[in-house]
Amino acid sequence: MRRPRRFSLGNLLLTGFAGLVFLFLMLPLLVVFPISVSSASYLQFPPPGFSWQWYERYLGDPGWIDATLRSLQVATLCTVLAMALGVPLAFFLVRSRLAGVRVLDRLAAAPIIVPTIILSIALYGVFSRLQLIGEWYGVAVAHTVLALPFVVILVGAGLRTFDEAQEQAAAGLGAAWPLIVWRVTLPQLRPSLISAAFLAFISSFDELVLAMFLSGASMTLPKKMFDNIMMEIDPTIAAVSVLQILLVGLCLGLTSLFGRGALTTTITR
């Protein structure tokens, strides 16, 4: 019989505090969304009227569209590379019994521990020698360095909770190891794989610091937004921000829908 859930004073205070923090973090959206549909010719709140002109300006500006498509291109390649490298690395870190594998496990998480500005300077020195500065695929490779830890952590968490008896049963029936991984292990890891792919995509699509060092004239959307704020401020930036927030929200929603349980497992571990 399931016990009724008890609410103590500490739990109520913690819930209330978390709710206030969430509302505080969401307050800027109450400004950004109305400004994006403002009829004013400059940033003005509250807006004097309703208009879709800034969304039309964004869709009609080749500079904004090129930056958006380039960010999608970079994020897609980053996701493919991060999954292709991160999934085998997660298998090795979880299943390997070699000495020093725990050190390698810590090194795999280093890119999310080291400040991004330091990583950007280091990658700039390497990429300048390889003549990758200004190339979109160079930016994608750099973003892969940041996205790789998310894939390793999420897939590794899924592997640690996976029942290896299923693989042993398949091996006992004569299945080869690659077929076992493809038909038995990976389907069971679907929530972790989907969550890892979406987080890799989001981390690349929203990354600014690396793009500022490596993208050159081939601007990604975050760098285009940064340059727009530095040079001219109009409500177009609010419209772009709203679209970016909606895209990230869609990815997070799909992650919670199809990758249910992966993030919870990672946090509890």
Image (spheres, rainbow, N blue to C red):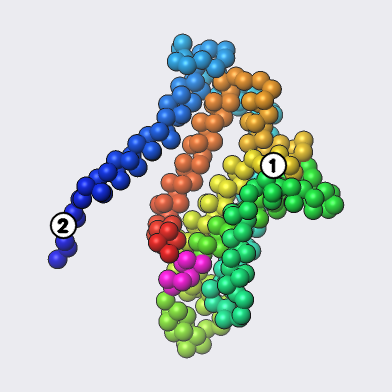
Judge by depth and name the residue closer to the eye, 141 or 119: 119
Q: Residue, x 59% and y 54% (percent of image)? A: 112
Relative to 118, is 5 on the left or the right? left
Q: Residue, x 43% and y 64% (percent of image)? A: 269
Which of the numbered marks, if any, corresponds to residue 211? 1
Q: Which SS class for mark 1?
A: helix
Amino acid type, residue under disc 2 in the picture? Pro
- Choose top left, top right, bottom left or bottom right for residue 99: bottom right
Relative image position of residue 226 (x, y in whole percent): 65, 31
Regarding residue 186, the answer to whether it shows in the image is yes
Q: Is residue 223 magenta?
A: no
Count neighbours of disc 1 (C-alpha within 10 A) and say few if under 14, some if 14 to 19, many if 20 or more. Answer: many
Relative to 227, is 253 on the left or the right? left
The residue most toward the front is: 10
Amino acid type, residue under disc 1 in the picture? Ala
User: Compared to 225, does 256 lie above or below?
Assistant: below
Q: Residue, x 46% and y 71% (percent of image)? A: 160
Badge 1 or badge 2: first in the primary sequence: 2
Regarding residue 69, the answer to whether it shows in the image is no
Judge by depth and name the residue closer to the eye, 86 or 267: 267
Relative image position of residue 7 (x, y in whole percent): 20, 50
Relative to 60, is 10 on the left or the right? left
Find the magenta span and give its range: 156-162
Label 2 sits on residue: 4
Q: Which SS class for mark 2?
A: loop
Judge by depth and name the residue closer to the eye, 174 or 200: 200
